[in-house]
Image: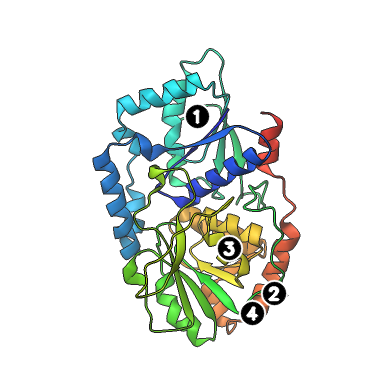
């Protein structure tokens, strides 16, 4: 049994865990995903959901909040933790894969009770340590990097899909515009300017108030606003939102629904989260970087730009929104997709 530990406060951490579980199951490996927030009391979950909305509406507040973020493990329900550890013992977990550093205090506690120690991998989606890992205990884990800023490379990856990227010639004159799982950042402010340049847009809205019917060149999509990762371990229910009609939210099969939009786009215009890098690699869709959320995202952007996989919004604007620059980044991504598959390595030692 491989136990994959994620956190629901960041889809860029949670969705890669879901992808890894699916890629392992395709190889006949028993894998489960557990979300940290399932151990929290209901009152704490309500506060977390309220914070997500507040951070979406005010990016400055989100940045300030990231600097003083508290460790959610301090608020876990002790009985829920005991039940979780009992399940690990009963299912004889032999491998942990940790996507959120907040889990490591609990993993450390569990390991201290084991006569046969399970292996532990820490899987970094961002190219440097993200906030949850900065004060995490050392449990002797193997470190896995899906992108690595210091070495300037992509050491391994988790395939979002086994399908090849859509060829450049088959793509529409369309951009995917979003703010990550929490809908954070400056992306909404760029919609009008990108439309004025003649681009069609797929915009991922976070709440109904983000959706407008003023411009026919914009398609809006969103996750079900009533869904949270701690409710289940499926992909986010996702669908197109048309003003005046009830949206139909559907779950992706084998991967998250927004990836299908990314795969057809000329570029993703977004802040540089780790999950966005993963989507970029497996769709061969370049990223036009907006303002980052914290230093780890700034380093992500530096890495992707250095590899030729994207460019800043300011540089693209200065070029006159030259689509040729996006095409060159697409070709660089196509050439770079032959990276070691972490799921294959993990299945090989299972």
Question: In the figure, 9 relative to 186: above or below?
Answer: above
Which numbered disc, 4 or 2, marks the residue that appears first in the sequence? 2
Which numbered disc, 1 or 3, marks the residue that appears first in the sequence? 1
Question: In the figure, 349 relative to 86: above or below?
Answer: below
Q: Label 4, on which residue?
A: 323
Instruction: Please name which of the two marks, 4 or 2, marks the residue nearer to the observer.
Output: 2
**Dots 1, 3 in contact, CB < 8 A:** no
**Dots 1, 2 in contact, CB < 8 A:** no
The x, y position of residue 251, in whole percent, is 49, 54
Image quarter hosting the N terminus = top right
Check the image and tell me how it is coloured: rainbow
The x, y position of residue 115, in whole percent, is 53, 12
Q: Are there few (<14), some (14-19), or many (20+) residues within 10 Å of tag 1?
A: few
Point 54% across, 82% down: residue: 199
Image quarter hosting the C terminus = top right
Q: Circle 3 sits in a helix, a strand or a loop, which is it?
A: helix
**Dots 4, 2 in contact, CB < 8 A:** no
Q: Label 1, on which residue?
A: 138
Point 72% across, 49% down: residue: 339
Which numbered disc, 4 or 3, marks the residue that appears first in the sequence? 3
State the separation of the CA atoms marked 4 and 2. Answer: 14 Å
Instruction: Please give the count of numbered marks on the rendered protein.
Output: 4
Q: Are there few (<14), some (14-19), or many (20+) residues within 10 Å of tag 4?
A: some
Q: Circle 4 sits in a helix, a strand or a loop, which is it?
A: helix
Which numbered disc, 3 or 2, marks the residue that appears first in the sequence? 2
Q: Label 2, on which residue?
A: 170
Q: Label 3, on which residue?
A: 260
- Left or right relative to 196: residue 51: left
Instruction: Please name which of the two marks, 4 or 3, marks the residue nearer to the observer.
Output: 3
Judged from this view, the residue extending furthest toward the top is 115
**Dots 4, 3 in contact, CB < 8 A:** no
Which numbered disc, 1 or 2, marks the residue that appears first in the sequence? 1
């Amino acid at each position: 049994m491989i136990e994959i530990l994620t956190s629901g406060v960041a889809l860029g951490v949670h969705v890669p865990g879901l992808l890894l579980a699916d890629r392992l199951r395709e190889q006949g490996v028993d894998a489960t995903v557990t979300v940290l927030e399932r151990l929290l009391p209901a009152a704490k979950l309500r506060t977390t959901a309220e914070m997500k909305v507040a951070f979406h509406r005010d990016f400055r507040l989100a940045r300030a909040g990231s600097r003083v973020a508290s460790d959610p493990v301090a608020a876990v329900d002790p009985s829920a933790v005991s039940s979780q550890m009992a399940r690990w013992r009963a299912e004889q977990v032999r491998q942990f894969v940790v996507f959120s550093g907040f889990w490591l205090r609990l993993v450390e506690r569990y390991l201290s009770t084991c006569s046969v120690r399970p292996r532990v991998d820490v899987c970094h989606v961002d190219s440097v340590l993200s906030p949850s890992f900065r004060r995490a205990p050392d449990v002797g884990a193997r470190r896995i990097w899906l992108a690595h800023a210091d070495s300037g490379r992509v050491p391994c990856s988790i395939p979002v899909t086994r399908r090849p990227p859509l060829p450049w010639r088959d793509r529409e004159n369309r951009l995917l515009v979003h703010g990550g799982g929490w809908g954070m950042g400056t992306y909404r402010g760029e919609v009008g300017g990108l439309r004025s340049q003649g681009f069609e847009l797929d915009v991922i809205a976070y709440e109904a108030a983000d959706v407008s019917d003023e411009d026919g060149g914009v398609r809006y999509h969103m996750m079900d606003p009533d869904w949270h990762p701690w409710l289940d371990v499926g992909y986010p229910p996702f669908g197109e939102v048309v003003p005046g009609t009830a949206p139909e939210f559907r779950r992706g099969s084998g991967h998250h629904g927004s990836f299908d939009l990314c795969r057809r786009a000329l570029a993703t215009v977004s802040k540089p989260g780790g999950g966005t890098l993963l989507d970029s690699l497996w769709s061969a869709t370049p990223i036009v970087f907006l303002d980052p959320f914290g230093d780890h995202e700034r380093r992500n952007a530096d890495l992707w730009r250095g590899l030729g996989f994207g460019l800043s919004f300011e540089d693209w604007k200065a070029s006159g929104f030259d689509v040729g620059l996006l095409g060159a980044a697409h070709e660089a991504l196509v050439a770079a997709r032959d990276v070691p598959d972490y799921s294959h390595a993990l299945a090989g030692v299972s």
